[in-house]
Structures are given as structure tokens and as C-alpha cells.
Image: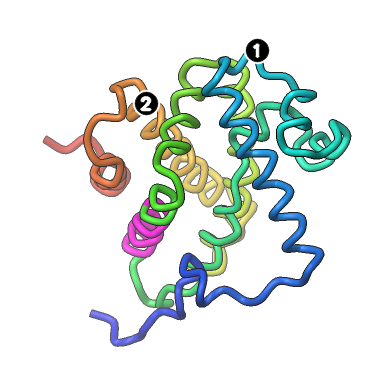
Amino acid sequence: MSTMTAAPSPFSPADRPQLGLRERKKIKTREAIRTATYALVKEQGYDATTIEQIAERAEVSPSTVFRYFPTKEDIVITDEFDPIIMDELRARPADEPWLVSLRYVMHRAIQYGLKEDEEVSRLRSHLMVQVPAVRSRTMESMSVTGTMLCQAISERTGRDPESLEVRVYAMSLVGALMETTLYWAEHGHEGDFKDLVNRTMDVLEHGLSD
């Protein structure tokens, strides 16, 4: 058991570095656009919701919406978690087994995400299942998350982040988590999502053991 301790969690608002005014305004605008989108989708459905309606509800211009989110799908799938997760991984003890670190960080991310708004988490996963455009855009965005994971794995293991082995490993993690999210939504969000992630990590660690 390692005696090293992790750095303060970036998931804790009190421990996050203070952001400048410009960055705080950007985050506030992104959140306003997301909040407007989720509210409209709940009211009238995804397909019926337009960028113009989102802009009006968020009290911004349509061009501002597009400046922050290139497509309507990006509003649904984009969040602030990837950089935070990478910071959290880097804060784990250097001698901690990789999957132990990853399991810990995923639990923290789930805890934070559901605490922020469990209803939004359910809506996003539901749209991934029900709306092909959202699911397709999610799969495209996986490459960005995969690239960041490659870098984190490289920093931990010393391996080349562009090596086939690291890329395959990183994308297997990203793909597995996406399938877990889809499974959760397809089964009516039954059970604890954290338990599903634990099952996913077990498969990655041990394979299809009996």
C-alpha cells in the first residue's frame, strides 16, 4: 500500500484555482446555453429545439451559441470534466496501479456529475441512445478524450503516447465508458451508475472471467 497522498481534488470547488473574470464569463455563458438547451429539450423534444430558441432562452445571440458550440449536438455532449479528470489522474500517487487510479477518478467524476444534476446526466445519456446525431457526435468526440488519456498514460508509464499499445488502451477505456453509459440509458437508468462502472473496470482488468 502506498504511503503517498494525492493532491487536493480538482472536483472540490473550494480547492480549484481562482479563475479570471474572462474565463468565469465564458463558463457562465456555456452553462447558460446548456441550461437553456436542456430545458427546451425537456419541453418540446430534441429535434424541435432550434439554435435560435436556445439563444433566446439563454439571452445570447445565435452566433454566440455557435462560437461556444459548433453544433447543437456539442451542447449536449460537451462538459468541463475532461481537463478536471486529467488533473485528477495526475494527482494520484505515481506508484499506484493505473487501473486503481482510473477507478478512483471515475468514481469521483460520477459523484461530482450526479451531484451537479442527476436529471441532466440521465437526459444526456437518454439522448445518446435516442438521437443518432448525438450518438455520432459523441463517438467523434471520443478521439479528443482518448488523446488526453494517451498523454496521461504516457506520463504515468513512460510509454510513447503515440504508440499503438497506448492508443489502443486509451480508446478501449473511452469506448468502454461510452458503452456503459448507453447500457445505463437503455435499461431505464436502473441501478447505481457507479456499480456499472465498477463492472466495466472489472472487465477491462480481468476480461470475461466466469
Q: Are marks 2 and 1 in contact (CB under 8 Å)?
A: no
Magenta stretch: residue 104 in it? yes
Left or right of 201 on screen, residue 51: right
Magenta stretch: residue 16 in it? no
- On residue 48, the disc is 1
Relative image position of residue 195 (x, y in whole percent): 23, 44
- Magenta segment range? 98-110
Residue 157 seen by the camera: no
Relative image position of residue 35 (x, y in whole percent): 61, 39
- On residue 185, the disc is 2
Q: Compute the Cα span from label 2 to label 1.
A: 21 Å
Left or right of 97 on screen, residue 73: right
Classify 126 as above or below 130.
below
Count of numbered labels shown in the rendering: 2
Relative image position of residue 119 (x, y in whole percent): 42, 36
Relative image position of residue 71 (x, y in whole percent): 74, 28
Q: As rendered, which of 62 and 93 lies closer to the eye?
A: 62
- The local secondary structure at tag 1 comes to loop
Q: As rendered, which of 37 and 104 lies closer to the eye?
A: 37
Classify 198 as above or below 53.
below
